[in-house]
Image (spheres, rainbow, N blue to C red):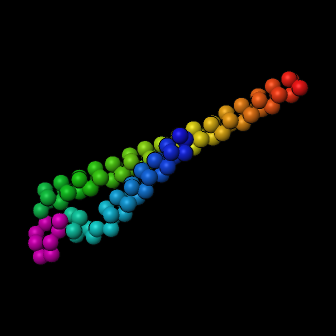
Amino acid sequence: MGLAVFLGGVALLLITFKLAFDLFSVPPEKALNLAKGQPLELGVVGSTLTGLVKQILLLIVMAITGSLIGSKGVHMYTESRALADTKEQVVEVKTQTVE
C-alpha cells in the first residue's frame, strides 16, 4: 500500500512538472496577449498577469501536495517493512522457546 501511495505522489509530481513546462515554454508576448504595433492595454495585461500568477501558485501547491503524498508513501512502506521484520523476530523467539 505504501508503494502505491508513493507512486501516486510521484505521478502527481510528474503531472505538475509537465504543466509547469508547458506554462513556462510559452513566449511572453503570447502569454500576455501582446501584439506588435498595438498599444499596450494595461487592463488586459494586468488580468492576464494575474491569471499567470494564479497558475504558478497552483503549481506550487500541486508540487507540495505531490511531495507530501510521496513522502507519506515512503513512510508507510518503511513502517510496513519494520513491522514485518518484527513479526519474523517474534516467530523466531516463539519457535526457539518451544524447542
The single residue placed furthest to the front in the displayed view is 99
In the displayed structure, 35 sits above or below 74; it is: below
In the displayed structure, 67 sits above or below 49; it is: above
Residue 84 figure quarter: top right
The single residue placed furthest to the bottom in the displayed view is 37
Q: Nearer the viewer, residue 59 or 39?
A: 59
Please give the range of residues in magenta: 33-40
Residue 45 lies, in percent from the top left, at 18, 60
Residue 29 lies, in percent from the top left, at 22, 69
Q: In the rendered image, is residue 71 in sight?
A: no
Left or right of 14 on screen, residue 3: right
Please check the rendered image and state whether residue 83 is part of the magenta-colored stretch, yes or no. no
Residue 14 figure quarter: bottom left
Q: How many dots with numbers?
A: 0
In the displayed structure, 88 sits above or below 50; it is: above
Q: Nearer the viewer, residue 21 or 38?
A: 21
Q: Nearer the viewer, residue 67 or 97?
A: 97
Q: Residue at x 10, y 69 (%)?
A: 39
Tell me which secondary structure the magenta stretch mostly adopts: loop
Residue 5 lies, in percent from the top left, at 49, 43
Q: Residue at x 57, y 38 (%)?
A: 76
Left or right of 86 on screen, residue 12: left
Left or right of 10 on screen, residue 27: left
Q: Looking at the figure, which quarter contains the C terminus?
A: top right
Residue 34 figure quarter: bottom left
Q: Residue at x 21, y 63 (%)?
A: 32
Q: In the rendered image, is residue 37 in sight?
A: yes
Residue 66 lies, in percent from the top left, at 44, 47
